[in-house]
Image: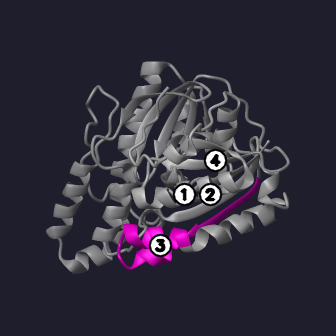
């Protein structure tokens, strides 16, 4: 079952061709260089870049997949939300256009469920071979979202914990910006933290003793700001690695604490971890260690390109929607939903 999928949820123009869980092509045009000098994503620039590149990326995906022509796919899938409204609009408009031109049905996918299904992606040879043994506890960690979700069956989601303010990835990016490290900052923080002392500075762990499973990073971000404000510039420059390591540890401690609470509360030890922040190798190692202590299994996206935003994960999630006949009946009424939430 061939699906052409499109994701333009933020600052990457992504198009993929998948066959059930098999990735035949997964093309991504990153806008990082466009937004870097602004220190974050500029909506108007993101929209323009998507419009300028989407046809090219579609052509690259179709050619790379070996299917020959879009007419040979069975369905068109597209991210409906959550995401940047003007960016989502570009992908949805293109999906409608292709569906009408080639007479294909459209499947809409929640970007976050795409991240969940990214952990079960396979290459064109069908590897890795991971089975669905429900229930799973999905931990979604990205620039815009930090959520713990119970997945009882395909396309069945129950959010049991989420951030009440900033997301984990956003906190890391903001910390990097405060340190003058540029955008995006997560990867730079990770690199500096490898040679830093994570105990050099003590930053708060918001909601650490709270009995609920929600997250908060706003207070931590504020504490970091005031700590830097009290330091001479030379001290900051000479301690970038220690500051990065200490801040990263505070963020990750919050994540591990809530994940452990969730595992105890639900008695689920089959864990899915996905989202852009999962590219951090230190985070992955710490989560593996935690899950192992509970005799559990943890799945991360099997390929590096699936950690960040991509369209292959959208195509894989869409495949399971086709099994339930979840198609869009009226294309003219299809619209973006920037704050779309996971639901049953």
- Identified at 37% across, 59% down, the residue is 172
Check if residue 45 falls in the magenta segment. yes
Asked whether residue 203 appears in the rendered view, the answer is no
Apparent side of residue 18 relative to residue 309 in the rendered image (left or right): right
> At 38% across and 45% down in the image, what residue appears?
339
Q: Are marks 1 and 4 in contact (CB under 8 Å)?
A: no
Residue depicted at 59% across the width and 49% down the height: 78
Q: Specify start and end residues of the magenta stretch as a single range.
A: 24-51
**Which percent across, then down, holds residue 178?**
28, 69
Q: Which quarter of the figure has residue 130?
A: top right
The numbered disc on residue 77 is 4
Q: CA distance from mark 3 to mark 2?
A: 18 Å
Q: Considering depth in this image, is 228 or 61 the residue closer to the camera?
A: 61
At label 4, counting other C-alpha atoms closer than 10 Å, the crowd grade (few under 14, some 14-19, many 20 or more) is: many
Mark 3 → mark 1, Cα distance in angstroms? 14 Å
Disc 1 and disc 2: Cα gap in Å? 6 Å
First of labels 3, 1 by sequence position? 3
Judged by depth in the image, the label closer to the viewer, 1 or 4, is 1
**In the rendering, at what x and y percent does residue 342 appear?**
46, 35
Q: Secondary structure at mark 3?
A: helix
Asked if marks 1 and 2 touch (Cβ < 8 Å), the reply is yes
What label sits on residue 93 in the rendered view?
Answer: 1
Which residue position holds label 3?
48
């Amino acid at each position: 079952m061939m699906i052409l999928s499109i994701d333009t949820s933020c600052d990457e123009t992504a198009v993929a061709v998948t066959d059930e869980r098999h990735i035949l092509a997964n093309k991504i045009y990153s806008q990082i260089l466009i937004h870097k000098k602004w220190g974050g994503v500029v909506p108007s620039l993101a929209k323009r870049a998507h419009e300028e590149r989407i046809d090219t990326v579609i052509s690259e995906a179709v050619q790379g997949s070996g299917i020959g022509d879009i007419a040979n796919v069975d369905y068109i899938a597209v991210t409906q939300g959550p995401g940047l409204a003007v960016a989502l609009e570009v992908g949805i408009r293109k999906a409608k256009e292709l569906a009408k031109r080639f007479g294909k049905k459209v499947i809409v996918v929640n970007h976050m469920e795409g991240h969940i299904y990214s952990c079960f992606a396979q290459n064109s040879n069908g590897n890795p071979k991971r089975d669905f043994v429900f229930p799973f506890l999905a931990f979604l960690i990205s620039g815009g979202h930090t959520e713990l979700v119970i997945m009882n069956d395909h396309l069945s989601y129950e959010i049991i914990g989420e951030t009440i303010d900033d997301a984990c990835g956003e906190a890391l990016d903001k910390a990097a910006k405060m340190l003058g490290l540029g955008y995006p900052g997560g990867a730079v923080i990770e690199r500096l933290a490898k040679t830093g002392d994570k105990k050099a500075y003590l930053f708060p762990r918001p909601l650490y003793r709270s009995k609920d499973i929600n997250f908060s990073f706003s207070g931590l971000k504020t504490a970091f700001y005031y700590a830097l404000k009290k330091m001479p510039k030379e001290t900051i420059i000479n301690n970038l690695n220690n500051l990065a390591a200490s801040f990263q540890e505070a963020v990750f401690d919050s994540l591990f604490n809530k994940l452990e609470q969730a595992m105890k509360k639900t008695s689920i030890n089959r864990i899915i971890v996905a989202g852009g922040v999962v590219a951090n190798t230190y985070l992955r190692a710490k989560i593996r260690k935690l899950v192992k202590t509970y005799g559990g299994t943890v799945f991360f996206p099997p390929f590096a390109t699936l950690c960040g935003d991509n369209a292959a994960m959208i195509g894989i999630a869409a495949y399971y929607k086709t099994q339930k006949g979840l198609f869009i009946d009226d294309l003219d009424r299809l619209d973006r939903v920037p704050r779309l939430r996971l639901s049953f």
